[in-house]
Amino acid sequence: MDFHCHIDLYSNPKDVIERAKKEGTYILSVTTTPKAFPGTKRLAHSAPRIRTALGLHPQIAADRISELKLFDLMVRETDYVGEVGLDGSREYRSSFEIQLQAFRYILDSCEAIGGKVLSIHSRSAATAVLEELETRAKSSTPILHWFSGTQKELQRAISLDCWFSVGPAMLRSEKGIQIARKVPRNRLLLETDGPFAKLGKKVLFPEDTQKLIPQFSQIWNCSEADAFGQLSLNLRSIGHIAKYRV
Ligand code: MN
């Protein structure tokens, strides 16, 4: 599985989709603007294991805030919302208030419908994201993608019953490994964040998540078959949530 991938931003999305179909990879195809949603969804029309999420990336929220109207028009077309969230890093701090406005609007819109699964960006803004989730996301299922908060923030996210999607780039750092180790096993999903995320100079593709199975067998101190089994169970569980949770 690759539960956070920007299929539309690869240089050849059709190849990515054909390979995923051949490998049987389940993909959450996230978008960065509401405008990108219809075309990105269309790309995957022949791929039953791909789900397209409707998003507004916090790094471009300030430029695209007017697209929230489009968000409302399309939010009933999918169980999945992402990439959304907040970015408090230096480059984006100046737009933080607008990001917050957009994120709150999206969470409220999701809550009005209920049962959405959200793929959430929280770079340098984990506390602010968790505060919003606590008050505005009662029926939504939040997945914190590439979580990089502090131990305290991690514990708070766990107590809010958040899910976590973890990728090869995150597991290159000792901090990322420590986070993955502390996440409850039944709340963990795999992602690449391709084509943004790279391993060395190589852009990551959905099938690269297969290489994480040996890593999780080490992190969880179990066999590779058991790690695969746990992750498959998690994938089925989140799919079930998306369909039936209200
Ligand atoms: Mn992303």
Image (cartoon, rainbow, N blue to C red):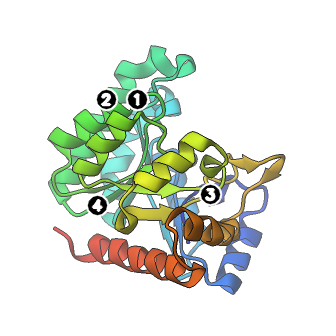
Front residue of this view, candidates 246 and 189: 189
The answer to whether marks 4 and 2 mark residues whose Cβ atoms lie closer than 8 Å is: no
Q: Is residue 91 above or below residue 47?
A: above
Q: Residue at x 43, y 63 (%)?
A: 188
* Cα–Cα gap, marks 4 and 2: 20 Å
For label 4, the residue is 116
- Left or right, 30 with reference to 13: left
Q: Residues within 10 Å of mark 1 (few under 14, many from 20)?
A: some
Check if mark 2's residue and mark 1's residue have beta carbons within 8 Å.
Answer: yes
Say what amino acid the circle numbered 2 marks.
Ala
Q: Which quadrant holds the C terminus?
A: bottom left
| Residue 223: x %, y % from top left | 56, 80
Q: Identify residue for label 3.
A: 192
What residue would you read off at disc 2? Answer: 128
Measured as percent of width and height from the top left, residue 134 is found at: 19, 41
- Residue at position x 68%, y 83% from top? 23
Label 1 or label 4, whichever comes before in sequence order: 4
Q: Position of residue 140 (x, y in %)?
A: 24, 56
Question: Residue beneath label 1, please?
Answer: 125
